Amino acid sequence: MTKRSDAASATSAATPATLALTRAGIPFTARSYDHDPRAAAYGLEAAEKLGVEPDRVFKTLLASIDGELAVGIVPVALQLDLKALANALGGKRAEMADPKVAERKTGYIVGGISPIGQKTALPTVLDESAILSETILVSGGRRGLDLELSPDDLIAVTSGRYAPIARARS
């Protein structure tokens, strides 16, 4: 995996996420696709358009754990198990964060929230299924841009941890 090296493409794709990875010296591949604003599920759209198995494409979700925001990262075909996320962070009560609060705290828009380079550093948990893949994809900070990197590098750059926080859609 390599970073984009030519300045023009790196500048046009630059987001807080790509800048944070570059600063940290973490190798990644920026993978762009033409986002359809009518897409119902951004993560599944990314998997399809990039030709990647949905279990390797992860979505970034914000939740409130006992009143404090946290990040849960799960495969796009699955759901975030709020109780499991709360348990992983030593909390009791969890609910999805208000989308406007998520946008304000991360600096990203819904559908393009990256777990990397957020305005406010938040406790982060990556579903343990990520360790089954050499690389995974997460949002690059805007709709139509995903970043491919190793799960361990994602944990390192977000100061996150692994835990079983995904469940099948109900």
Image (cartoon, rainbow, N blue to C red):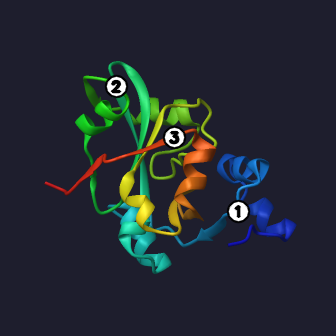
Outermost residue on the top side: it is 67
Count of labels shown?
Answer: 3
Q: The C terminus lies in which quarter of the figure?
A: bottom left
In this view, 33 is above or below 128: below
Of the residues tagged 2 and 1, which is closer to the observer?
2
Residue 136 % position (x, y):
50, 64
In the displayed structure image, the side of residue 112 where residue 67 appears, left or right: left
Q: Mark 3 or mark 2, which is nearer the start of the sequence? A: 2
In this view, 153 is above or below 118: below
Specify the quadrant of the image occupied by residue 36.
bottom left
Q: What element carries label 1?
A: loop
> Residue type at mark 3?
Gly
In the displayed structure image, the side of residue 75 where residue 110 appears, left or right: right
> Residue type at mark 1?
Pro
Read off the residue under disc 1.
27
Specify the quadrant of the image occupied by residue 132.
bottom left
Residue 77 % position (x, y):
29, 63
Read off the residue under disc 2.
90
Q: What mark, if any, has residue 160 been given in the picture?
A: 3
Structural crowding at the residue carrying mark 3, measured as other residues with C-alpha within 10 Å and reported as few (<14), some (14–19) or many (≥20): some
Residue 50 % position (x, y):
49, 77
Q: Which of 49 and 166 is in front in this view?
A: 166
